[in-house]
Amino acid sequence: MTYFVEGVSKHLEAQPQVRRIGEYKSVAEAIAVAQKSIEQFLRGEFKRGMDATKLFSLYEERGEHIFIFQDEAKTFNVAGFDHADYARTLAGEISGGVK
């Protein structure tokens, strides 16, 4: 079974743009790649003193939203990963819990 990781960005163009990040043999590997992509964005946007709400807001507005799907199940996003939940949690960790 193959897991596809794709990023959707809608802040640069009028229509959402889809980018294939990669194809992976396990869901764990696909999730790790998706999480790394989100972490890179959040760490790159974080400024000292920024609260979690602001950091997450930047992700929602300008970040690439990551989705994972299986080739056989024709799912849009696999169970066990939600890009928004992960980004919200990580924004809190990066900001040191400042809300």
Image: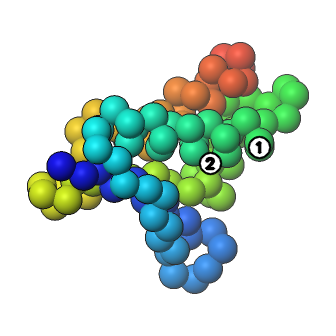
Q: Is residue 38 left or right of residue 6?
A: right
Please indicate, yes or no, whether residue 57 appears anywhere in the rendered image: no
Which structural element holds mark 2?
A: helix
Identify residue type, mark 1.
Glu
Q: Which mark is residue 59?
A: 2
Residue 4, compared with residue 44, is above or below; it is below
What percent of the width, then of the height, locates residue 11?
Answer: 63, 69
* Residue 65 on image: x %, y %: 50, 54
> Quick check: can you spot residue 61?
yes
SS of the residue under disc 1: helix
Q: Residues within 10 Å of mark 1 (few under 14, many from 20)?
A: some
Residue at the top extreme, as displayed: 96
Choose the circle earlier in sequence order: 1 or 2.
1
Marks 1 and 2 close (CB-CB < 8 Å):
yes
Residue 34: image location, x then y, percent: 47, 43
Front residue of 19 and 84? 19
Disc 1 from disc 2: Cα separation: 8 Å
Location of residue 36 in the rendering, given as x and y in whole percent from the top left corner: 56, 38
Residue 14's disc number: none
- Residue on which the image places disc 1: 45
Which amino acid type is shown beneath numbered disc 2?
Answer: Tyr
Q: Residue at x 77, y 43 (%)?
A: 45
Residue at image position (63%, 20%) is 93
Q: Quadrant of residue 81?
A: top left
Q: Is residue 1 left or right of residue 63?
A: left
Q: Residue furthest front?
A: 25
Mark 2, other Cα within 10 Å: few <14 / some 14–19 / many ≥20? many
Q: Residue at x 50, y 37 (%)?
A: 35
